[in-house]
Image: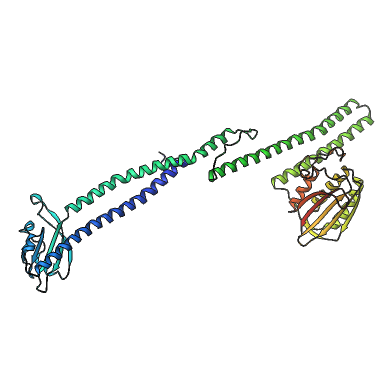
Amino acid sequence: MRLVPRSLRGRLTLLFGLGTSVVLLLCLSLLYLALDRQLDGAVDADLAGRSTDLLAGLRSNDLAAVAGDPMAQLYAADGTPLATSVSVAGQVLLDPVQVRAVRRATTGSTTLPVGTAGAPLRLRLLSRPVDGSGRVLTVAQPLNAVERAGARQLIVLAVASPLLILALAVLVWLLLRAALRPVDVLTREAAAISTLDSDRPLPVVPGDDEIARLAVTLSGMLSRLAVAFDRERAFVDDASHELRTPIAVLRGEIDLALQVVDDPAEVRQSLLAAQGQVARLGRLAEDLLLLARERAGSLAAHREPVDLTDLVRAEARSLALVNDLAIEVRGDPVIIEADPGRLVQVLTNLAANSAAAGAGSARITVTAGHDQVVLQWADDGPGFAPGLLDAAFERFVRGDAARTSSTGAGLGLSIVRAVVASHDGTTHLRNGPPLGGAVVVVRLPVS
């Protein structure tokens, strides 16, 4: 048997009920004690008033006042009763020892058979010395009425407490059900959304409380997940498209080679073409693997002290030959902690992009700052298209045909950004000076 409810509403109601029970029982107990103390105080006040009135009469030797009191007794110094009320005739409220012990006003209690049909009755006593003669006056008050009133109060509290706790628990249950109803709606709607392809939105929760903010947060999360899902799906589609062409060409060249197996020249030409497509597939696979590692946060940069300007000068010569670019390098020597192989990959992709855009020259400027090194690549090509600056770092993004003759996969700048990010650096794009074309600014931290 499960003692703790499964639902949040049930658990909160149970906790509230337990907490309310403890607090309520404590408060009602204090209330009962206060009422009991108040009843005892009323009895003591009545006894004090009667005793004062009787002492005033005894000072004038009026013993009849004691006899006329509802319940009083006057004792001599040795404990002998001198005057007694009719209601306690034949009984003594105090024995001789108790009489001799009275030195000041003293309260107490006793039980005498003075009730109906001689039933025992608890009495509240107030004893006071009358004067210096040693006489003692005792007045009494039956406690049956007080005890009955206390018992009624206890019964009322015992009956009212569980009813009040139950009523509060039901009220809290209803309030929690009303407060958590939007959560139930959100849960059902979220469960009904089977895939991120669904255009079904989460319901809007009115107000500005925690649940309303939760609904807004969940809706925003679903929107971001849908965007990420669309981007990943687009990435898969683009990757499939990029792989389809070289695979189709490779298959065609192999088929052609098989058909002209008796012609060595044709076979050689087909194999060379197939080799080029295999190299293209290899580069594409490596680029996709690098981006996948960067996305997973596992793109490692094996850092070592590198003279960035010296590395750029060394690579500029080979890059100029391969890409038919006139590359100028400016900058003073600067040492950073970086992966030289990855930095060469950045320069290679930047040179390939400039060459594909039709640039004839490029300038690389290395500037050392206080806490970072800036590597600026600028070319004299047409620059980035106005609508491409914000999306150029995305995967499989290419310039329009008027600005580029590239048949690449559109992963170059994505790889540049991934490599720079693995070095805790940043990358920015713009068009304009110093050569009027595209400008790529890479910022790397100083070691």
Q: What colouring style does the render use?
A: rainbow
Asked if residue 398 can be seen in this view, the reply is: yes
Q: Is residue 340 left or right of residue 50?
A: right
Q: Position of residue 223 (x, y in %)?
A: 64, 39
Q: In the image, what residue occupies the spot 8% across and 61% down? A: 92
Q: In the image, what residue occupies the spot 41% across and 44% down? A: 14
Which residue in the rendered view is the most extreme toward the top?
259
For the N terminus, give its image quadrant: top left
Res 374 quadrant in image: bottom right
Q: Position of residue 431 (x, y in %)?
A: 83, 48
Q: In the image, what residue occupies the spot 56% across and 34% down? A: 189
Which residue in the rendered view is the most extreme toward the bottom?
132
Q: Position of residue 280 (x, y in %)?
A: 83, 38
Asked if residue 97 can be seen in this view, the reply is: no
For the C terminus, give its image quadrant: bottom right
Closer to the camera in the image, 305 or 220: 220
Res 159 quadrant in image: top left
Q: How many marks?
A: 0
Closer to the camera in the image, 36 or 305: 36
Closer to the camera in the image, 57 or 421: 57
Closer to the camera in the image, 257 or 244: 244
Q: Is residue 323 left or right of residue 67?
A: right
Q: Is residue 368 left or right of residue 124?
A: right
Res 284 quadrant in image: top right
Q: Is residue 298 above or below residue 41?
A: above
Q: Position of residue 148 (x, y in %)?
A: 20, 50
